[in-house]
Image (spheres, grey):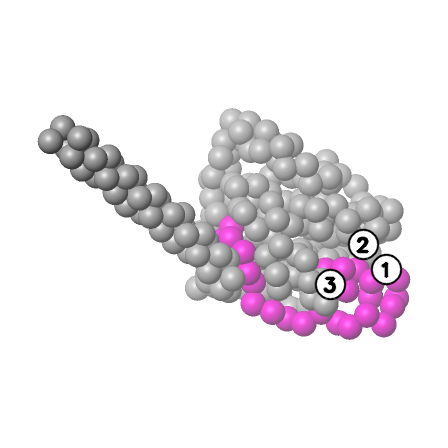
Amino acid sequence: MKSFDGFRSSRLRLGIVAVGSTLLFGIIATAFWYEDLRYSLPTPRPPALVEPPIGTTLPVGKWLAEAGFYAGKRPVLVHFFNPDCPCTRFNVEHLRKLHARFGNRVFFVGAVQSHRRRSDLHVKVQQLEIGIPSFIDAGGRRASEAGVYSTPQAVLFDASGRIVYRGNYNTSRYCTDPRTEFVRMALERLVDASQAPSPPSTPAYGCELPSADGPIASQAN
């Protein structure tokens, strides 16, 4: 009798473990599916979004000066990002490659937004190691001026401050499809005067910037 009870108890424990494992696997699979689906869909457009048309001149030189940077007479690429966004982290290696190839002719600078305190944000940006100087886009002012509401996004200016490209780095969240490396195409057309195809206007993909639904508070600490 004791042997039977022990056998039944063992089967019960195995059953509990099996059910628990199945539930855990289901939770993990659901979370992965949700995250993958979430970032494969276009980022919701803010109702009050204003997007300056391509060719619009913006005071990017003033942006840089206020942040303590100087681009000279070079074109400027502003990389809008949030270190807490998975898509931003997936994009880091691709951004480094672009900077390695074009950084001697184009000034790369990051514009970072986050709900984190300023001190915490500096730590997160350093940990991300994107390889370019960055400034905090306090209140989302620069993103709003450029018509950016998602991350990671790039805005490429020519040497006169005119927007020549604004949008995604790639249609793939992992930036692995060379056929849709839109920022690379825009840089080639601008810097190399190549016949690279003009990057298309595509919906924004990725994470909503913290300022997408309104200004965020400037982190003071």
Question: Where 171 falls versus 91 (above or below)?
Answer: below
Can the viewer see residue 143 in this picture?
no
Can the viewer see residue 154 in this picture?
yes
- Which residue is rendered at x = 84% and y = 51% of the image? 101
Question: Where 14 falls versus 86 (above or below)?
Answer: above
Within 10 Å of the Cα at label 2, are there few (<14), some (14-19), or many (20+) other Cα atoms?
Answer: many
Q: Is residue 215 left or right of residue 66?
A: left
Question: Mark 3: which secondary structure?
Answer: helix
Q: Nearer the viewer, mark 3 or mark 1?
A: 3
Looking at the picture, which amino acid does disc 2 mark?
Pro
Q: Name the mark on residue 191.
A: 1
The residue identified by callout 3 is 178
**Where on the picture, by quarter, is residue 182?**
bottom right
Span colored in magenta: 183-209
Nearer the observer, 11 or 105: 11
Question: Mark 1: which secondary structure?
Answer: helix
Looking at the picture, which amino acid does disc 1 mark?
Val
Within 10 Å of the Cα at label 1, are there few (<14), some (14-19), or many (20+) other Cα atoms?
Answer: some
Looking at the picture, which amino acid does disc 3 mark?
Pro
- Which residue is rendered at x = 83% and y = 51% of the image? 102
Q: Give the Cα separation between the discs numbered 3 and 2.
A: 23 Å
Which corner quadrant holds the N terminus? top left
- Which residue is rendered at x = 69% and y = 66% of the image? 180
Among numbered discs 3 and 2, the one appearing first in the sequence: 2
**Which x, y percent locates residue 68?**
72, 36
Nearer the observer, 31 or 154: 31
Q: Is residue 118 magenta?
A: no
The residue identified by callout 2 is 75
Among numbered discs 3 and 1, the one appearing first in the sequence: 3
